[in-house]
Image (cartoon, rainbow, N blue to C red):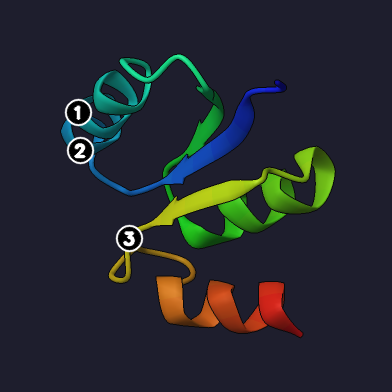
Amino acid sequence: MDKKKILIIDDSPFTRKLIKDMIEEEPDLEVIDTASNGLEGLKKVLKQKPDLITLDLEMPEMDGFTLLRFIMA
């Protein structure tokens, strides 16, 4: 079975690391990349096509709600 590809989008380096460490404990999940704001996250979503995204709602440049609207459009 292929691993599910996950993109972590959060402005806190500590939180990104914490989420990454938890995800990597699961053998069927793989963190493919991280982003520190919504704008960077949008670029990575469009380029890498992750299966799952963890998304912080309050971030600089583009908040999580705005990013989600772009992804869902």
Who comes first in sequence, dot 3 or dot 2?
Answer: 2
In the rendered image, residue 65, in percent from the top left (x then y), is placed at 45, 81
Q: Are marks 1 and 3 in contact (CB under 8 Å)?
A: no
For label 1, the SS is: helix
Q: Nearer the viewer, residue 14 or 61?
A: 14
The answer to whether residue 63 is visible is no
Q: Nearer the viewer, residue 32 or 26?
A: 26
Residue 68: image quadrant is bottom right
Q: CA distance from mark 1 to mark 3?
A: 13 Å
Residue found at the very far right of the displayed protein? 47
- In the displayed structure, would residue 61 be above or below residue 48? below
Indicate left or right for 48 with 58 as reference.
Answer: right
- In the displayed structure, would residue 69 be above or below residue 64? below
**Which amino acid type is shown beneath numbered disc 1?**
Leu
Q: CA distance from mark 3 to mark 2?
A: 9 Å
Q: Nearer the viewer, residue 34 or 40?
A: 34
Quadrant where the C terminus sits is: bottom right
Residue at image mark 1: 18
- In the displayed structure, would residue 47 be above or below residue 16? below
Q: Residues within 10 Å of mark 2 (few under 14, many from 20)?
A: some
> In percent of the image, x 17 and y 31: which residue is there?
14
Who comes first in sequence, dot 1 or dot 3?
Answer: 1
> In percent of the image, x 54 and y 40: which residue is there?
7
Q: Are marks 1 and 2 in contact (CB under 8 Å)?
A: yes
Indicate left or right for 28 with 3 as reference.
Answer: left
Q: Residues within 10 Å of mark 3 (few under 14, many from 20)?
A: many
Q: Can you tell which mark lies on residue 46?
A: none
In the rendered image, residue 47, in percent from the top left (x then y), is placed at 82, 43
Q: Can you tell which mark lies on residue 15?
A: 2
Q: Are marks 3 and 2 in contact (CB under 8 Å)?
A: yes
**Which amino acid type is shown beneath numbered disc 2?**
Thr
Q: Can you tell which mark lies on residue 56?
A: 3
